[in-house]
Image (cartoon, rainbow, N blue to C red):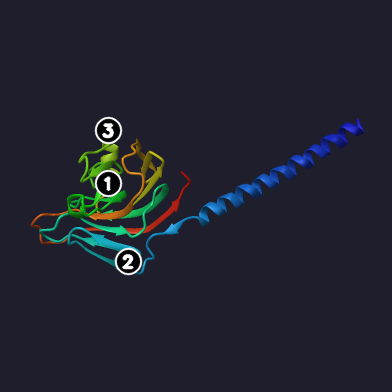
Amino acid sequence: MKTRMKTSASSSRWLSRAGSVLALFFCLTQLASSQEWTPLFNGKNLDGWEQKNGLAKYEVRDGCIVGSSVPDSPNSFLCTKKTYANFELEFEVKVDKELNSGVQIRSESKPDYQNGRVHGYQVEIAVGGFSGGIYDEARRGKFLNTEKQTEEIRGLLKDKEWSKFRILCQGDRIQTWVDGKPVTDLKDDVTKTGFIGLQVHGVGKRVEPLQAQWRNIRLRELKP
């Protein structure tokens, strides 16, 4: 009986130590993952970004990137100078309800394609629209989702209120979430890498500016 009790006690101690090691490993793994996040916007200026197409005004205000529409301008894009292939991207966005916006991912601008027009996957941002859907900007010209626009999705963004987007691109799979709600789960391999761009849509002749704002933009690159 004593031998069995000693064996049981030894096993308990071993399991306890093993559990502690696993817990430590998990904590270190989580810490390592959190250290991989890189801010794409420093909250102070537009270093690392460049404007492509359009005349919309981009500036930094109160730690946010603010994009303001101007009349008689095509779609405008503030784009990262660096390109990304496999990544997780998070940001917060607030947009006027009259303004359509979006964030380009794995996108391109080439002199031999429509005179440098920005094209590629766009994560839609629109109050009352298909926010989180994937639109193929200046290429196929349509939403690529198999998912339908539901009333819940159309109600995700509120006028002039902050919402959080999460985007996961790995291999040929693109997934999006808006305020924790899954919206897109798409497989498409037309473009495997490209820049990230913040869109201010053209507003025709409208003089009064409409705005889209972004903050807390961060990304971590993933293995293929």
The residues bearing labels 2 and 3 have C-alpha atoms spaced at a distance of: 36 Å
Neighbourhood count class around disc 2 (C-alpha, 10 Å): few under 14, some 14–19, many 20 upward: some
What residue type is disc 2 on?
Leu
Q: Nearer the viewer, residue 220 or 3?
A: 220
Q: Quadrant of residue 190?
A: top left
Q: Position of residue 186 (x, y in %)?
A: 34, 36
View extreme (bottom): residue: 44
Residue 79 on image: x %, y %? 30, 58
Point 37% across, 40% down: residue: 175
In the figure, is residue 181 to the left or right of 19? left
Instruction: Work out how far the residue at label 2 is from the one at label 1, CA to CA, in angstroms.
Output: 22 Å
> How dense is the environment of label 3, judged by Cα within 10 Å: few (below 14), some, or many (20 and up)?
few
Q: Quadrant of residue 133?
A: top left
Say what secondary structure mark 3 lies in: loop
Amino acid type at mark 1: Gly
- As helix, strand or loop, the secondary structure at mark 1 comes to strand
Q: Quadrant of the N terminus?
A: top right
**What residue is pinned by disc 2?**
46
Q: Of the residues under marks 2 and 1, which one precedes in the sequence?
A: 2
Q: Which mark is residue 224?
A: none
Residue 151 in the image: above or below residue 115: above
Q: Residues within 10 Å of mark 1 (few under 14, many from 20)?
A: many
Q: Name the residue that disc number 1 marks.
A: 120
Question: Residue at label 3?
Answer: 148
Residue at image point 50% right, 55% down: 36
The answer to whether one can see residue 162 in this image is no
Q: Is residue 90 left or right of residue 28?
A: left
